[in-house]
Amino acid sequence: MSGDRLEQYGSSTAEVARRAGVHRDTLLRWLRHGLVLEPSRNRHGWRTFSEEEARAIISFAKSPSETSARIMTIREAEPPPYATTLNDIDWDFQGAKTNYLTHRIHPYPAKFIPQIPNALIQELSSVGDTVGDIFCGSGTTLVEALTLKRNAVGIDANPLACLISKSKTTMLEDADIEILQALTAKSRAFGDSILASEEEGDLFPPGRFVSSAWRPSYDKLTFWFDAHVIEELAEALQWCRALPSEAARDLALTSLSSIIVAVSRQDSDTRYVRREKNIPQGETMRRFSRTLEQATNAAVEFTDIAESRFQRHIIEANLLDAPQVPPLDLVVCSPPYPNAYSYHLYHQTRMIWMGMDQPKFKREEIGSHRKYSSPGKNGATAETFRGEFASIFQWLARHLKRNGHACFVVGNSTLKGKTYNNADILSEASRAAGFREAMRIARTIQSTKKAFNPVIGKIKQEQILVLQNADGAR
């Protein structure tokens, strides 16, 4: 091909490989691993190398180490078109309100603030696109996607996370609101009657009320809960499950779940130690009523903003099982950090009361503190995390559109006294699946956010890693 024609149309992968004296598959492997610069594609989706890119690859074939540095210099000198906009954002979001709409419905330790996915969704997707969160947790990304007129797909192995995400992204009908308001009034009246009877000392002496409803067959139930709290939770749970509307039922169950730790003897969401709280009789039901009323009001606000033409899918699945999901245009998530948190542990009593398979989630949870702090030879390591995500990226590459972006909000981890940069681990793990690192953004976490195991300490900074599916299947 002549020089003029090469400049006009560019070279194909096969042509560049021939000129470099390597097999086409070798060049493709270099591209997948990010060793050479990914070129643009023509209208048919085929790679077209400029003459400068072709010559860089030819030079790389002769002296990989020297040319690799040159290619990285070219890459850094040509930032993606959205880099300026994203770099101009103050990602610390100091003082920003984070509990608007349904974001305030249920406590969920270590969740990221909604302003982060909001900014990324606005810049890296368009109205009508499908935004996925492959570790959806409490549904923060999903709420933002729907209010920004995108479709939303959430995936999580934690069944409690899926329940919360469904509730936070459900649009209520008028009939749902009436059902929830009736349950709010019923639980408030019931709690008031128990409390009043206890104070009067006649009709309902302490321990008198006994629910006929189901309660968990959990051998530590009385260790974590007062007897009267167990009876009130069982009664409220029965009422929630009997609701005729799925939307109302999910929101009621989520509201009940949200108070379980508060009325238990577990110290807090982030401290799995026992302490006496002296919850009065009737207070559990009264607290459920208040929480349900607040959740209903928040869901009504969300319903007023969201539009029914944009859909959401919540999928309970382990990503390592390669679940089937709708095609994604953008992914925004905060993946679990190795050794930082154990969701199966801190949500244990909630999952038991909700009748969920907590042991199954414990086995599947990625990054749990218990798995990474194990002193035995089978304890997880940084390589465990890298290997799991290498598999996840192979799966994601098949479901994220070509040149689509996957954004990961991550901090560092400390494993056996050594600090690991999780953004580096994810970036490296993604290359074999055809992803390339587009940019990174550093941010400082507010002092009240992201508290983890006190032995490990607080994560003070994190990075927003933006990857591009340069070798996507679609």
Image (cartoon, helix red, strand yellow):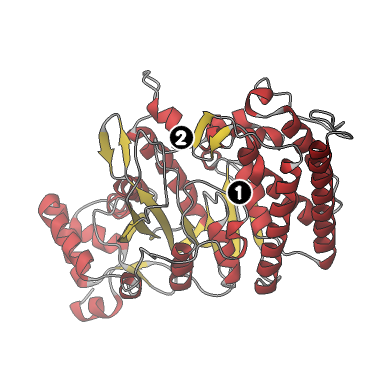
Left or right: 22, with 296 as reference point: left
Which mark, by number, is residue 456? none
Q: Which residue is mark 2?
A: 368
Front-most of 272 and 249?
A: 272
Residue 334 horizontal/vertical position (percent) = 45, 51
Mark 2 closeness class: few <14, some 14–19, many ≥20 residues within 10 Å: many
Front-most of 14 and 391?
A: 391
Left or right: 236, with 438 as reference point: right
Check disc 2 and give the amino acid type. Answer: Ser
Picture quadrant of residue 312: bottom right
Q: Secondary structure at mark 1?
A: loop
Q: Secondary structure at mark 2?
A: loop
- Of tags 2 and 1, the one toward the viewer is 2
Please determine whether, in this image, residue 363 is positioned above or below residue 420: above
In which quadrant of the rendered image does the N terminus lie? bottom left
Q: Which residue is mark 1?
A: 324
Q: Between disc 2 and disc 1, whose residue precedes?
A: 1
Front-most of 253 and 78?
A: 253
Left or right: 455, with 236 as reference point: left
Q: Residue at x 39, y 35 (%)?
A: 339
Check disc 1 and give the amino acid type. Answer: Gln
Q: Residue at x 57, y 55 (%)?
A: 139
Please determine whether, in this image, residue 5 is positioned above or below residue 174: below
Residue 405 horizontal/vertical position (percent) = 43, 62
Residue farthest along the front direction in this orientation: 200
Left or right: 48, with 282 as reference point: left
Q: Residue at x 81, y 61 (%)?
A: 176
